Every structure is written in structure tokens, then in C-alpha cells.
Image (cartoon, helix red, strand yellow):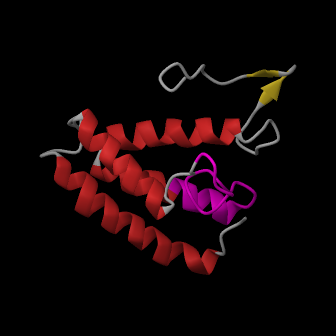
Amino acid sequence: MSIDPNDAAPLLAEVASFAQGRIAGAVLRPEQPIAIGELEQLTREALELGMLPAPDADAGFGLWESCDRPSAMEFNIGILRQMAHANIGVAFVWQRVAQRRKRQRGPHSPLMIRRGGRSSGIQDRAFG
């Protein structure tokens, strides 16, 4: 599923609202780590809102779920940008979560880069 460029701005406004309201409010400064319990709660909320790809759901508009057009990539970067402004650690963790979910959906994912049948990316030890 690909995002229409006309829908990207309102969706990114919602992401920005969540990032500033929920994530930025969890710490005094954006570079400070968030407590693990708070990160788990924020992750559950992001999954419920569709900002992150759910493990057993059909593809939607979450981070890295669509990579087929420049507008989709612009949307993905916009999500990460909003999250990083609120808290860089959350953006990093959610980037890894989304990449892992993308890999779990199969080797034909546009985010997967393969050379000789092996992934050329960094091994994901933090999430399995």
C-alpha cells in the first residue's frame, strides 16, 4: 500500500503531535534516554496508532511499510524526523523495530538489500 502525497502532510502532522505530546514530554531533553517502561508504553501506543508496523497485520502506512515511490520514502523520513526531534533514542529504536518487521515479512521487501543471498545490513541482536 502506498501513501498518496496529498495524505502525507496531515498524517505527518498527527505524528508530530504524538511526538511532541507523548515522546518529548517523557524527558527533559531530546537526547536523554527514556525509561524502559515508558518506551514500552509509547511503542504500544505507536503500534495502536499505526505509526509502527504491527507484527501480524496487513501492511498499512507505518514506518517503512511503503518504500515504492519517492513520496512514500519522504513520508518515512518525515516520521523519523518527527520522532528524532522529540527523542533520538526512540527514533533509533523504532527504526530498528520497523526494519525487523519488514524483514519478517519476507525477502522481497523493498527495504531488504541482499548480496549473494545474505543480508548486507547489520545483524539485529537487540530484537532477536
**Residue that extends furthest to the front in the rendered view of this protein:** 56
Residue 73 among magenta residues: yes
**Residue that extends furthest to the bottom in the rendered view of this protein:** 6
Q: Residue at x 57, y 78 (%)?
A: 7
Residue 34 among magenta residues: no
- Relative to 81, residue 90 above or below: above
- Relative to 99, residue 14 above or below: below
Q: Quadrant of the N terminus?
A: bottom right
Using the image as rendered, state which of residue 65 and residue 80 is in the foreground: 65
Q: Quadrant of residue 110?
A: top right
Q: Is 41 displayed left or right of 12 in the figure?
A: left
How many marks on residues?
Answer: 0
**Rendering coords of residue 44 (x, y %):** 40, 50
Q: Quadrant of residue 20?
A: bottom left
Using the image as rendered, state which of residue 123 and residue 74 is in the foreground: 123
Q: Residue at x 56, y 51 (%)?
A: 54
**Rendering coords of residue 126 (x, y %):** 47, 23
**Residue that extends furthest to the left in the rendered view of this protein:** 28
Q: Residue at x 60, y 19 (%)?
A: 123
Q: Quadrant of the C terminus?
A: top right
> Please, what is the dominant secondary structure of the magenta stretch?
loop
**Rendering coords of residue 75 (x, y %):** 56, 62
The magenta segment is 55-77
**Rendering coords of residue 21 (x, y %):** 24, 63
- Relative to 59, residue 101 above or below: above
**Residue that extends furthest to the right in the rendered view of this protein:** 116
Q: Is 44 displayed left or right of 122 in the figure?
A: left
Q: Residue at x 61, y 50 (%)?
A: 64
- Relative to 109, residue 23 above or below: below
Q: Quadrant of residue 29?
A: top left
Using the image as rendered, state which of residue 72 and residue 109 is in the foreground: 109
